[in-house]
Image (cartoon, rainbow, N blue to C red):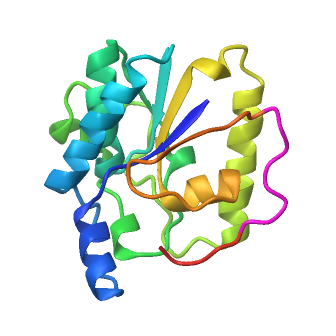
Amino acid sequence: MILLRHGQSEFNLLFTQRRKDPGIVDPVLTPLGHEQAAGAAVALAAEDIRRIVVSPYRRAIQTAMPVALRLGLKLTVTPVVRERYAFTCDVGSPRTALVEAFPEVDFAHIEEVWWPPQEEPADQVEGRAGLFRAEMAALDDWKHTLVVSHWGFIMAMTGQSVTNGQMLRVDPTAPGPALVPWKHH
């Protein structure tokens, strides 16, 4: 499967400049983030993608939409691949707000409030990533899956730090990382 980190968000831009939480709840993509999403759609057009799994955060959905449109696929939204809850940007939008913002996406199966109430310990994120790895490994067609996710979840899945818009190929049948070198992004 292919893991794609969402494009640059308003939070990423300000956090990189100031190295402190700018206090933006569920930020959207910046113009650069939209360019990164469009670039991913072009790059992924040559892949045999049949399923797009995406986090419910707006930045992830905005990154996945150009790929979905180009490939003629629907998005499968799941909080399992959400970001590690650690910053203001990790407060999500309620399901009803997501339905309004993205009427073409099916949110019927997620809770109104789908993000955790407080900071998520690293071991919980690693456990969530391990569960997702096992679920994907059980599917015959995992090779045809794109997962649009976040720095922390991808770190837990692979042990690698990725930049906005970066993609990694992952074999979910292989063991996960022995050590996840957590550090703040």
Q: Is residue 38 above or below residue 84?
A: above
Query: Is residue 83 in the magenta section?
Result: no
Quadrant of the image containing the N terminus = top right
Q: Is residue 8 above or below residue 76?
A: below
Where residue 64 appears, as percent x and y from the top left, is 34, 35
| Image side of residue 167 versus residue 96, left or right | right
Residue at position x 35%, y 35% in the image: 40
| Image side of residue 2 versus residue 8, left or right | right
Residue at position x 74%, y 44% in the image: 131
Q: Nearer the viewer, residue 112 or 91?
A: 91
Camera sees residue 23: no
| Image side of residue 70 versus residue 170, left or right | left
| Image side of residue 91 versus residue 178, left or right | left
Where residue 73 appears, as percent x and y from the top left, is 37, 15
Residue at position x 48%, y 18% in the image: 47
Residue at position x 52%, y 78% in the image: 184
Q: Toward which corner of the image does residue 61 lie, by quadrant? A: top left
Query: Is residue 175 in the magenta section?
Result: yes
Q: How many marks?
A: 0
Q: Is residue 179 above or below residue 169?
A: below
Where residue 25 appears, as percent x and y from the top left, is 27, 68
Where residue 178 appears, as percent x and y from the top left, is 85, 60
In the image, the segment drawn in magenta is: 173-180
Q: Nearer the viewer, residue 52 or 39?
A: 39
Camera sees residue 125: yes
Magenta: main secondary structure? loop
